[in-house]
Every structure is written in structure tokens, then in C-alpha cells.
Image (cartoon, rainbow, N blue to C red):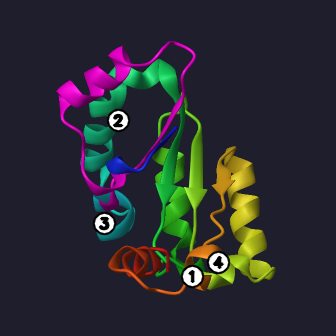
């Protein structure tokens, strides 16, 4: 199950414990790193934030399928050294996935190849979200307009 809520806020400890109580041992979560790490800090100088997040989620450690790093569209090829440094600093006992949104990472050029090669070398999954259906919808409601803004 994708844990999208962790992108927006760190869950309270009692919520994490409730999630553990409500699931069986074979259930797997895929929690997103908080935006304070991926968006505001842009993966830089965020060791304390990462430690806080992983510590908070630790009651669910046996049920983590992967931790998911969703990067903003502004995070482009020039930022890859920060991504490599961040990924290399993470604990090795978990699986990780990275979702990029910068257009150059989808252009089938050297930038995309460099991204894919770096992820592969580190054993990190590439998460791909096809947001075209979201943008193809006519924005007849505030919910659709909001989704379109968030998926750029």
C-alpha cells in the first residue's frame, strides 16, 4: 500500500502503532519520504529529518516494502549528485524507490540514462507515474485542478 500521507506530514507515533495493529505480517507499506526532505531540503543537510522519519516508522520496519522518494519537477539532472549522496547515506536494510518528474528524465537522452544507471548501481527502483490522464481531464472541479497542479 502506498503511504502518500507521509509526504505531507510525519504521522504521530500512535498512528504508526495503529497501522501496525491493523495489518498482518505479510502486509507491505510503501511510505513516501516527507516533502521536508525531498522538496524543501532538496535532499541536502537533512540527516536529522531522515533519522526522525525512519525512527518514527520503525515499528513498521518488517512491513516496509520500500521507502519512496518523490522528487519535485524542479529536481533535474544537475541535482543528481545530491540524489546519489542521499541514497548512499540511507540504511541498507530497506528497499527504496525514486520517482522523478523533471522532463529531461523522460526524454530518452543521456540524462535519463544517467539516472537509470545510477539507480541500478545502487539497487534502487525507479517509480514511474503516468500523469497524462490527470492532465487530459477537463478541470471542471477544484479537485481536478488541484490534482493537475500537484502532478506537474
> Callout 4 environment at 10 Å: few (<14), some (14 to 19), or many (20+)?
few
Which residue is outermost to the front? 140
Disc 3 and disc 1: Cα gap in Å? 32 Å
Q: Residue, x 58% and y 56% (percent of image)?
A: 98
> Callout 3 environment at 10 Å: few (<14), some (14 to 19), or many (20+)?
few
What residue would you read off at disc 4? 132
What residue would you read off at disc 3? 41
| Mark toward the viewer: 3 or 1 | 1
Q: Residue, x 60% and y 73% (percent of image)?
A: 131
| Mark toward the viewer: 1 or 2 | 1
Q: In which quadrant of the rendered view does residue 104 lie?
A: bottom right
The boundaries of the magenta stretch are 7-35
Local SS, label 4: helix
> Callout 2 environment at 10 Å: few (<14), some (14 to 19), or many (20+)?
some
Disc 4 and disc 1: Cα gap in Å? 9 Å
Task: Return the mark for residue 54.
Answer: 2
Upstream in the sequence, badge 2 or badge 4?
2
Disc 2 and disc 4: Cα gap in Å? 32 Å
What residue would you read off at disc 1? 137
Local SS, label 2: helix
> Relative to 108, is 49 on the left or the right?
left
Local SS, label 3: loop
Amino acid at each position: 500500500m502506498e503511504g502518500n500521507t507521509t509526504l505531507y506530514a510525519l504521522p504521530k507515533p500512535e498512528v504508526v502503532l495503529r497501522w501496525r495493529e491493523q495489518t498482518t505480517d505479510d502486509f507491505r507499506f510503501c511510505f513516501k519520504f516527507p516533502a521536508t526532505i525531498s522538496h524543501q531540503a532538496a535532499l541536502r543537510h537533512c540527516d536529522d529529518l531522515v533519522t526522525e522519519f525512519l525512527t518514527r516508522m520503525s515499528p513498521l520496519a518488517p512491513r516496509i516494502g520500500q521507502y519512496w522518494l518523490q522528487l519535485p519537477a524542479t529536481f533535474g539532472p544537475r541535482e543528481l549528485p545530491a540524489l546519489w549522496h542521499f541514497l548512499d547515506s540511507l540504511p541498507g536494510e530497506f528497499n527504496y524507490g525514486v520517482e522523478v518528474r523533471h522532463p529531461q528524465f523522460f526524454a530518452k537522452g543521456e540524462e535519463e540514462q544517467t539516472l537509470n544507471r545510477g539507480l541500478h548501481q545502487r539497487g534502487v527502483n525507479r517509480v514511474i507515474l503516468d500523469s497524462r490522464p490527470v492532465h487530459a481531464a477537463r478541470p471542471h472541479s477544484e479537485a481536478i485542478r488541484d490534482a493537475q497542479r500537484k502532478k506537474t
